[in-house]
Image (spheres, rainbow, N blue to C red):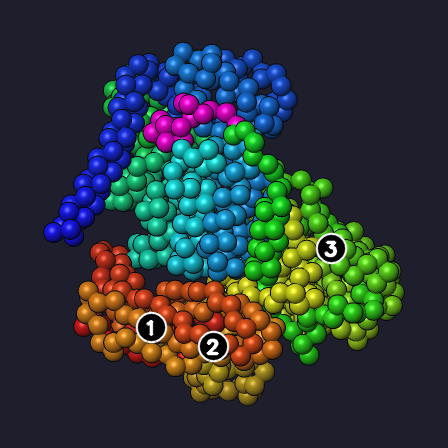
Amino acid sequence: MKLTKYLNSVLLILVVMATLSCSSEQDEMDHVDSLINQMTLDEKIGQMNQLMNFVDSLPIDPYFYNLIKEGQVGSVLNAFSPEMIHEMQRIAVQESRLGIPLLIGRDIIHGYRTIFPVNIGLAATFNPQLVKECAEIAAMEARSEGVNWTFAPMMDISRDPRWGRMVESCGEDPYLAEQMAVASIKGFQGDDLSNKNSIAATAKHYVGYGAAIGGRDYNTTLIPEAELRNVYLRPFKAAVQADVASVMSGFNELNGVPTSGNVYTIRNILKNEWGFKGFVVSDWASVKNLQVHGFAKDSMDATEKAFIAGVDMDMCSSYFIDNLKSLVENGIVKEELIDNAVRRILKVKFDLDLFDKPYATEGNKLLTEQALDLAKKTVIQSAVLLQNKNNVLPLSKNIKKVAVIGPLADAPHEQMGTWVFDGKEENSITPLKAIIDFLGEERVIYSPGLETSRTIDKKGLNDAIKTAQNADVVLLFMGDESILTGEAHCRAELTLPGCQNELIHEISKLGKPTVLVMMTGVILMVEPILGKVDALLYGWHPGTMGGPGYVDLLFGIESPSGKLPMTFPRTEGQIPVYYNHNNTGHPPSDESWIRMYDIPVKAWQTSLGNTSHYLDYGFEPLFEFGFGLSYTEFQYSDIKLSKKVISKNDTLVVAAKIKNIGGVKADDVAQLYVRDLVGSIVRPVKELKGFKRIRLNPGEEKIVEFMLSSEDLTFHDGEKWHVEPGEFHVWIGNSSKASLMTKFELK
Ligand code: GLC
């Protein structure tokens, strides 16, 4: 009897809660609709207009002031100061007819004032929880200055290191990208957008931007439907399921149709098929760019095409504010479609509680100890140890003399990386400073060697060599200035810029233990220098706490644990090279590789193995996806399945033993890969379907478990989704070269 009563009361509570949440949702929509009913057409279109105020100090220039006051601006972006943000918001709230608050947008890509490692480095942590915490800190800091919307996370799948924006991505894998995207969205938006420290997030750049031909930013993308569904759309679908508040349409043209004018991707897939309830903002003037693409004949045509495709807010082209009204008055665009767009935008403003709390959140602090500790922890988990010959790392704390060399060793601005509007270089702790703090001035000698990463003047090399001669160990900090990465900054050649390679070569002649820490946001071609250094730690652009994070790794307080989120080619000529490729009908092998200089003169053309490789560089990348060394060693064994045969409704448990067989405590990232041997379209040779970061003491052993469902085995064939019976291989290991494998059958 008691149990029934208990269950009844639980049921009652659930019903009440559900009713309340629906009713609050309904209340909100009633609010939105009642506001829309009061709005003129001009005011409605004003909400769909986002502008940047280029005057960088108060007072707000009269033109911009009036636009806001007349309700012609729904959102501003990248304002120059919190004071300007406050004043623009004040005008909107207190002086416009309806007092509708502004969405204050900003590129908060990897931190606000506390700058975390660039996003490709955050992906290398394989730690979504950590990435969520970084987004939480960024959101709290942003709200403290009145910002309530970030144009992040970027979730473009990136398979081409020549693409400068790989720095903002989570790399080549859709599963890793979706896990990181959802983590960031939850961090930015919290569990309720109305929280005082939540900000609206943006899933960008919708869609396929990273597939730019030649890795050249803004270039054409040609993506077949199956690839679009199975790879590029995956993270965005997960973002929509995570209730992301907005989506940003991209710059790229996808199969001939620009993504900011693409009815199929925006209206059909995003809004209709997926039921996305937020709003779509264009990328910067990408509405106007429809003309440049040759997709629209004039501004009116561009406006119509972007709006009909499903763009709700126009970033900085002013085409919506200039043209939409006449499109409505000429009967080309129905006002109810305008209302739908405005409804989406106003809903986010209500969700953010901006009508009650339009201004900065009081009391939030920037650069708190918690924020800086998290930033340091993220540096530690993002760095990837790619080589450690003779176990030169970790260094002894009792080392007598360390030479710190290189143009990135004391470059507080550069180490923050690209997309840093609010980070300040005076807050950066550089590698040089952190090493001096750790060892004391007397044990550290320093020479930049080169003024910047691009310096080709060799006058500083001698000083660097002399400095290195007087040390027991040489620590090189090389890579890129931050401006050499990011939007519109792509390179056809990815060798270290300037004469850094020469500096490394000269230092290597000294025969001293040499450690290279690479500080960049992209994948540089490091094969030519691997033989010249003992250790290579890929530290990305590490942000504010780069120095302290590196010190903990270099001196063994922590072991490196980062894993590569993108394949490292041996040379640019191998690009694109990524782990989740198809097998082809002529898969390469070591045996079948015809090495260019082994071919007999006048060999008969078909006398050698015909497989998919390069005569000069073979087929293997330099470092594979998921790779990263540690100061210890992990052994994987005993892979087991809960069943050998599963049906579509089963969940399969895949487990393996992981043991720390080395001498230091460390994290490893256990990774689960699957291969569908035969499909109605061919399936990749491996696909990441799970990962877990695990900390083990020396000698400690744990069982790592993953769950696989038929959902995980589903793929799109260009027409529809399938999950097909047949044999599957499954691996557990700590890189995409995992060899511990077993098989199961899907009935
Ligand atoms: C830029 C970028 C986009 C950014 C926007 C606002 O061109 O493509 O990622 O959010 O403009 O700065």
Cα separation between marks 1 and 3: 43 Å
Q: Mark number for residue 142?
A: none
Q: Residues within 10 Å of mark 3 (few under 14, many from 20)?
A: many
Q: First in sequence: mark 2 or mark 3? A: 3
Q: Nearer the viewer, mark 2 or mark 3?
A: 2
For mark 1, give the secondary structure: strand
How many discs mark residues in the rendered view?
3
Task: Residue 701: give its label.
Answer: 2
Precedes in sequence: disc 1 or disc 2: 1
Q: Residue at x 28, y 30 (%)?
A: 24
Q: Position of residue 442 (x, y in %)?
A: 86, 60
- Element assignment for label 2: strand
Looking at the image, residue 680 lies above or below residue 163: below
**Could you tell me the amino acid type at mark 3?**
Ala
Camera-nearest residue between 494 and 476: 476
Q: Is mark 3 within 8 Å of ligand 1?
A: no
Classify the position of the C terminus by image quarter.
bottom left
User: Which image quarter: residue 744?
Assistant: bottom left
Type of amino acid under label 1: Val
Question: Measuring 69% from the left and 60% from the top, which residue is drawn there?
Answer: 551
Q: Nearer the viewer, mark 1 or mark 2?
A: 2
- Residues in magenta? 345-360
Determine which of the numbered discs, if any, sits on residue 654 in the image: 1
Name the residue nearer the viewer: 338 or 648: 648
CB of mark 2 within 8 Å of CB of mark 3? Answer: no
Q: Secondary structure at mark 3?
A: helix
Q: Is residue 572 visible?
A: no
Give 407 or 551, whichever is nearer the viewer: 551
Q: Residues within 10 Å of mark 1 (few under 14, many from 20)?
A: many
Q: In the image, what residue type sits under mark 2?
A: Glu
Mark 2 CB lies closer than 8 A to ligand 1:
no
The residue located at (57%, 51%) in the rendering is 374
